[in-house]
Image (spheres, grey):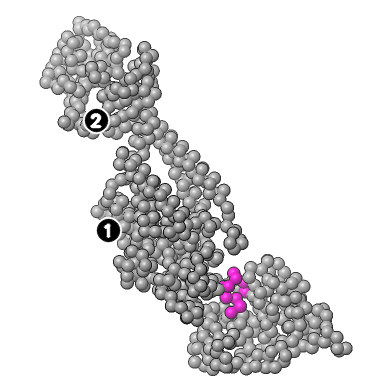
Amino acid sequence: MQIKRHRRTLKDGSEKVYTYLVSEDGQHRLSITDPANSSVSLTLYRKSEKKRIVAALQANSSLLVVGEAGIGKTVLGEAVAADLAELGFTVVQAKPLTAKQTLVDIALQLGVDTETLEGKAMTSAQLAIAIAGHLRDNVAFLICDDAQSYPLQFRVWLQKLTSQGQPMLLLATFPPARGIFLRLPRIELKPLGDKAIRQIMTRQAESLGIELSSGQLAQLQQRCGGNPMLAKRVVMEEYLGLDDVSPDHTQWIDGTPFLLASLMVLVITRFIGLGLNSTTLYIIGGILTVTVGIVRILFYSMPRKSNKLGQ
Amino acid sequence: MMVVTHTVMSVAFTSLAMGSAEPMPLLLAAIASQLPDVDTSKSVPGRLLFPISRYLETRFSHRSITHSFLATGLFGLVASPLMYVNVHLWQALVLGYFLGWFGDVFTKSGVTAFYPSSARLVIPGNPRLRLSTNSPAELFVLGVLVLVAVVSIAINSGGGIIRGFNQVLGMPSGAVEIVNNEGHQYLLNARINGIWRLTSSPVNSEQPFEVVKSLNPTDILIKDQQGNLYSAGVSEGSQIQASQVKIERVKSAQPTHQQFYLDQQPLEDALQGLPIQRTYVSGNLVMEDGESIQLLNSPQQFASIQLQGESLILESANPQQLTQLGDPVVTGSLIVRTIHVQQ
């Protein structure tokens, strides 16, 4: 295990040093300064993506990471920030507030003055220019989590930054295919494998203080769909004794069209009856045709899956 | 889904798909339908094959690897030696395994049918319309499946869906199909709804006629209690215009055939020693010069013996009727069909 230090600049200008142990393969970190509350203690299952992102950012290229909610974008962003800080770079982590608030937040993290020479608070436009100017002259990485929630103004400003060569990492949940989201090269995070999900669930169970047999875990794992957030949530639902509600993951294949298509194949009986001159087969085929038609009407009149929970 | 739902579903659809009500294939299908649930140690197969289920549930989520086309293919491969013993048993095994997990596609969590893809196959897409195990909806589905299984087994043990349809609808063409399929194994009776063509009076549908043979795709030759022959069906020349003909089996029977060649011999030569009951003589004979015969054919009955110039055309004629011809000298060939009924 190696010991690493991570230096972080807070909003009020002070610096804090985090010391932590890193496992050989780089996957596990345990904070020594504050093991219970440290946000830096995490287990990363997406090591190769992290390495790729860090390398890309260092090569002055920006990236967009997309994925469904809870797939692990924020955790990945934190790991990238930690890696870059460890390498000695300045990392700014932005949050989606109003455009003005976000700009003020970024300015504070960079150490850019938020007041004009006369002592008045800067407007958004002035802040934008000041930050852009600072970033032109200094190396810093910008990581924007929940990028789909930023106001349009802010996204336009980010676009301007990319044209001046500022490397940034955007993490977004299903952003629209417009503007900066379309311009940046994209990584789509896939669902995690069975083993990773099982580990996440086991760790969540341990932290909640409950014992789950592998049978129970296998049962719960059906509802996860490879999503780490859902993995933790289903263990929590089990802990709270909640009923099994409709699964929320997105890894589905709807088999209804295939079922109806294979039923329609039975209609061939009618033509066989016609060919063999067997009136009985023809009648049976006709009845099958009508039955399949009825089944189709019934299936397609059923309500579609709703996007809203509980509906 | 519950164990009983899996079993009933696999029996019902295996019976439907294979068109069979034989107990052995259905039993194998029922057993095979339990096997996909070996991926959890709480199920019956999981408890029986505990090491396997323990191995699977520590690594995979429930209803994933064993509930897939891949697993079905592997199972078929493993069971393939059975193909050389009896193909139907192997088919029933594979079908049973497939139906054992396919039922779970209709539940809330679905199955990873296309393993190694982790996407779960579900029908229908709306999760609220899918079944939760042990719910009232599943009990209702179980009831429906039991009905399907019972109907399927009943139809298939009654000779199959086509025969069942023919029985119920009683179409003359269907009756001909039944006679053609079963006439060489059974003595058949026919109940007829229709009218006598000459008198336009209705045929007594309560009284069964004995079936002699089928004449063409729409007509059959039948015999009443007195031994008179009639043709019944939809074509113009039949004595009975039948709207419905329902065939029933009476006893096991076996027809035998004999062929005779007569060369300027008296007809009696062929008729000697033939059994009296249920013997039907058919063929074409040419009478020698100078022979003449008077035929009295009743228009109400089927003309078994017809005269065309010097030719005698026989169709399912009774030996007694032939003796009444007076023993002419003839040349030609005859086929004698006798139906031996097992007592």
Quarter containing the C terminus of chain B = top left
The chain holding disc 1 is B
Q: Is residue A57 above or below residue B62?
A: below
Q: Residue lying farthest right?
A: A118
Q: Is residue A117 above or below residue B177?
A: below
Q: Nearer the viewer, residue B24 or A33?
A: A33
Question: Of helix, strand and loop, which one carries label 2?
Answer: strand
Residue B16 shown left or right of residue A225 in the figure: left
The chain holding disc 2 is B
Residue A60 visible from this viewpoint: no
Q: Residue at x 43, y 59 (%)?
A: B134
Q: Residue at x 53, y 63 (%)?
A: A246
Asked if disc 1 and disc 2 are in contact, CB closer than 8 Å, the reply is: no
Q: Amino acid at mark 1?
A: Pro
Residue that label 1 marks: B81
Camera-near label (1 vs 2) is 2
Q: Nearer the viewer, residue B33 or B173?
A: B33
The numbered mark at residue B250 is 2
Residue A131 shown left or right of residue A269 in the figure: right
Quadrant of the rendered structure where residue A164 is?
A: bottom right
Q: Position of residue A222 (x, y in %)?
A: 47, 67
Question: Magenta region: which residues?
Answer: A65-75
Q: Is residue B56 above or below residue B110?
A: below
